[in-house]
Image (cartoon, rainbow, N blue to C red):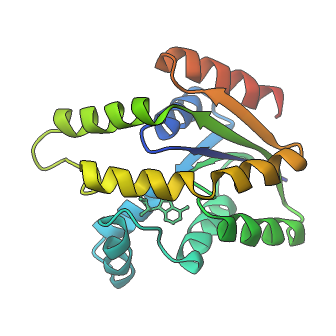
Amino acid sequence: MKKLFLIIGAPGSGKTTDASIIAEKNDNIVHYSTGDMLREEVASGSALGKEIDAYISKGALVPLEIIVNTIVSAINNAPVDNVLIDGYPRSTEQMTAFDELVSKEDNIELTSVIEVRVSQEVARQRILGRRAEAAPGEERSDDSEEVFNDRMKIYTDPLAEIQDFYTKKNLLKVIDGARTLEEVVADMEAFVKSKI
Ligand code: AMP
């Protein structure tokens, strides 16, 4: 049985960094970031990657079928039973689609949905700081201020409905992401370990 933790958070919340540190420290936990998996497909130069790039570079969500296939294959191919996936769901459509899928799957349990919460101001400062610090050629195409605003809106619009849905299922865990990296990681790691 795979135990799945979905991690959501605004761009700049630190969700990918937090989850990857936890997975590095624990042999029985693996982590996948939807954004990283999609960017890998883009980097491969495949036809699918080209299609994905058209969405990512604008800060738009990739179509449902592509993202669902991406995460389902990541879960099924995960080498250990405890799986952290950050960046999903990002819409009510994704939330509902995944809920139906998990209810039919005997070997996947949605253990928790962790929201890494930061204010819009903290998110903005971190993203624009990340852009300023990136080495030439390594900037993310979606880290501009304009695309940040679009990504923030896309994150915020369905958030209340997503929070409500998982709160009712008793699955939502909110973590304060505005603290230091060490504090956020310690909190998230302790929570994940308490559930596995
Ligand atoms: P991230 O690295 O999490 O900020 O994601 C970067 C970009 O990848 C997003 O702006 C979207 O274009 C795409 N993406 C990541 N996760 C998803 C998702 N769950 N659904 C659709 N598109 C996604």
Total numbered badges shown on the rendered structure? 0
Closer-to-camera residue (182/80): 182
- Front residue of 144/46: it is 144
Task: Residue at the far bottom: name it.
Answer: 47
Q: Residue at x 29, y 65 (%)?
A: 57
Spot occupied by residue 41 in the image (x, y as percentages of width and height): 38, 68
Give the residue at x 82% y 26%.
194
Residue 120 drawn at (x, y percent): 45, 37
Answer left or right for 109 relative to 131: right
User: Vertical placement of 103 versus 34: above or below?
Assistant: below
Residue nearest the observer in this picture, 37 or 115: 115
Res 176 → quadrant:
top right
Does residue 36 appear in the picture of this structure? Answer: no
Task: Locate residue 104, reporting x and y percent.
Answer: 88, 72
Q: Residue lying furthest left in this view?
A: 136
Instruction: Please report the residue visible at 48 percent of the width from the left and 16 percent of the height from the top.
Output: 180
Residue 72 lies in quadrant? bottom right
Residue found at x 31% / y 66%: 58
